[in-house]
Image (cartoon, rainbow, N blue to C red):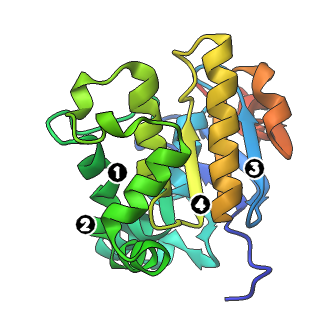
Amino acid sequence: MSADTPVFELLDLRFRYPGAPSDVLDLPRLQLARGQRLLLMGGSGCGKSTLLSLVAGVLLASAGRVRLLGQDWQSMRAGVRDERRVNHVGYVFQQFNLLPYLSVLDNVMLPCRFSAVRRQRALASHGKELGAAQALLQALDLESGLWRRDAASLSVGQQQRVAVARALIGQPELVIADEPTSALDEDRRDAFMQLLGGECARSGCALLFVSHDRRLAGHFDQVLDLPALNRAARAGGAT
């Protein structure tokens, strides 16, 4: 794979849910390079979450191509897609999706339990998975006294930082963030974006961030409006 290969690339993508009368997404082209930060804008129901699922190989395109690191998701069996996703994609969910009964450290190290690639990267950079998790939590300003506590006992802002550390451990090439700032006030939102952007820059990963909040635009290299790109929306097909 060439160093110039996009982290992800969509070509003539069309997607329609089974039984639906029309396409939800119809995009001519979209790509993201290594180290680039892209904000994809759009209101509720415009297809943002569907697009993220296609980029991550959770859903498969009805037509066209969706490639991660040069490989088309359509060419892989389900188990291979799952392995490739955990090896190369970190995900920050809107509701964080931490395991409440696990400690902060155990939550952060979870991707290394499922991905030999990310485990080896964590070992190469810090000697052990625990060291990599601790380094990320420290960089994200989560005090060490919280690291052994159950994730459920943390505040929303603290859980958010744990979710970011989990997404970044093992240096995945792509980090996807699905509206993780929607529950934050302005000060906490801006502080979070600075932390996320800084850690992505430090690890060299690409960041695909979706939101309806245009005040985030200054934190990104590129800002695109999904409804404007989506030919299905212009045709009245998106919901």
> How many residues crowd mark 1 within 10 Å: few (<14), some (14–19), many (20+)?
many
Q: Are marks 2 and 4 in contact (CB under 8 Å)?
A: no
Looking at the rendered image, the disc whose residue lies closer to the viewer, 3 or 1, is 1
Say whether disc 1 or disc 2 marks the residue closer to the N-terminus: 1
Amino acid on which the number 1 mark rests in the picture:
Val
Residue 231 falls in image quadrant: top right
The residues bearing labels 2 and 3 have C-alpha atoms spaced at a distance of: 27 Å
Which residue is drawn at the image coordinates 24% and 51% (left, top)? 106
Amino acid on which the number 2 mark rests in the picture:
Arg
Which residue is more in the foreground, 37 or 152?
152
The image's mark for residue 214 is none
Badge 1 is on which residue?
A: 108
Residue positioned most to the top = 185
The quadrant the C terminus occupies is: top right
Which residue is more in the foreground, 154 or 180?
154
Q: Position of residue 39 (x, y in %)?
A: 74, 39
The residues bearing labels 2 and 4 have C-alpha atoms spaced at a distance of: 18 Å
The residues bearing labels 3 and 4 have C-alpha atoms spaced at a distance of: 10 Å
Badge 2 is on which residue?
A: 113
Which residue is more in the foreground, 59 or 91?
91
